[in-house]
Image (tube, rainbow, N blue to C red):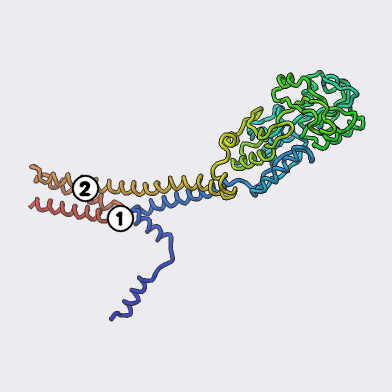
Amino acid sequence: MTSQPQANYFKSIMKPTYKLSLGKIMTTVTETFGVSRAFASGVMVFVALFALGVGFWFFYSAPPTTLTITSGPVGSVFYANAVKYAKILARNKVTLKILTSQGSLENLKRLGNPTYQVDIGFVQGGITNDADIRQLVSLGSVFYEPLLVFYRSPVPINLLSQLNGKRIAIGFEGSGTHMLALTLLAANGIQPGGATDLLDFEGEVAAQALIGNKADAAFLMGDSASPQVMRQLLHTPGIQLFSFIQADGYTRRISYLNKLELPQGCLDFGKNLPAQDVQLLGPTVELIARSSLHPTLSDLLLEAAREVHGTPTVLQRRGEFPAPLEHDFHLSADAHRFYTSGKSFLYRSLPFWLASLSNRILVVFVPMVVVLIPGLRLIPALYKWRIRLGIYRRYRALLALEKELFAQDANQRQKEFATRLNQIEEAVNKMKVPASFADQFYGLRGHISFVRGRLHNSNQ
């Protein structure tokens, strides 16, 4: 019959313990891997720091859910396209904030200013204006931006130089319209401060000035004027659309310009507008981003650009845009990859949020598993190898000593043998050996005692 104290003892050792302390964890690690407590502590600290770093990078590498685009004035083509982008990005739970601006030049200044909170923007080709663009990249050209020059005259004019001495609306300073107008007029000998009155009217204000005979000509582009304003001028009697009969020459002299053709009747077949083919000039508009733009958002923006700008119009073919055309800005590596091979498999096959999560797991945690787990297995192996080397080194010394016990001069060297044996035993006693090496450790001590016994017998 079991006594009460014995019963309590058996209950205490059989009762499961759920409390884990750091000491118990350390003991488990040292006994499992055969390492010292100091070594185990160092490894655990390293693993904890490594895990914290991986966790931080996992969350840090997540794509932001909000982007800011600098567009153009409300009602402009730039602004209208930004609104379309926002609707498409919203499908993937990404919010696109739209900042209005006066056009391409202001967009470029905002993007080039690191203190300004903006991520992307529309920039007309050819207006870098010596700005610092080292931290800016292009996601590609997204559409043509034709320059429409309307003028009031009873007879057609063929050369821009014929506008010398007239009142010309060239848009606000800071717009792409303003910069391109000055470039073209300068090529025809018309400079600010001369006989020609250059007005900073744009959009509807420029159109009304032309209709109300307060201006003789108006330069209009999509970064500052709406399509409705341009259609209004096309339907106004007495106002004509200028045709660049020297378009080929302009494109040779000004590399960022493209020759565009507006076919006869394409705007209104019933009224035959325009009444003849009209030659136009226009740069492409690039979607410019800061080089820090997240690769995933780059793909989303190009998908939106393909949806918005990929349809055919009177000036472009289906699928012509977006296009990897480089002018003043280098194409980003992410955009180059998108144009070459499209989106990655995960983003093609999974919803955006799930693809983003899966991609980060593959990029962050898989390398961690591949590197950390073999590393953690290698560290105990190296430590055990070091312990074994220490034990084997004492065994070699012990074997050498035992062998010398049978030499011819062994009787004269008994004191030397005893001293060496004591040194071996002292070195063994100072060894720090984990529990997993207890059998080898005590075996070594037993063999030392065995050799000591033989030495003692040889003295008798």
Three-letter code for the amino acid on which mark 1 is drawn: Ser
- The alpha-carbon separation of the residues under discs 1 and 2 comes to 18 Å
Q: Which one is in front, 23 or 130? A: 130
> Can you say whether 184 is above or below 65 in the image?
above
Q: Which mark is residue 395?
A: 2
Q: Which mark is residue 209?
A: none
Residue 299, image x and y in percent? 61, 40
Q: Which one is in front, 3 or 90? A: 90
Q: At x 35% / y 76%, what residue is drawn?
A: 8
Three-letter code for the amino acid on which mark 2 is drawn: Tyr
Quarter assignment of residue 329 = top right
Q: For mark 2, does the 10 Å Cα neighbourhood hold few (<14), some (14 to 19), or many (20 or more) residues? A: some
> Can you say whether 242 is above or below 414 in the image?
above
Quadrant into which the N terminus falls: bottom left
* Residues at marks 1 and 2 touching, judged by CB atoms closer than 8 Å: no
Q: Secondary structure at mark 1?
A: helix
Residue 386, image x and y in percent? 31, 46
Residue indicated by mark 1: 436
- Report whether 458 appears left or right of 243: left
Quarter assignment of residue 246 = top right
Q: Point out the frontmost of discs 1 and 2.
A: 1
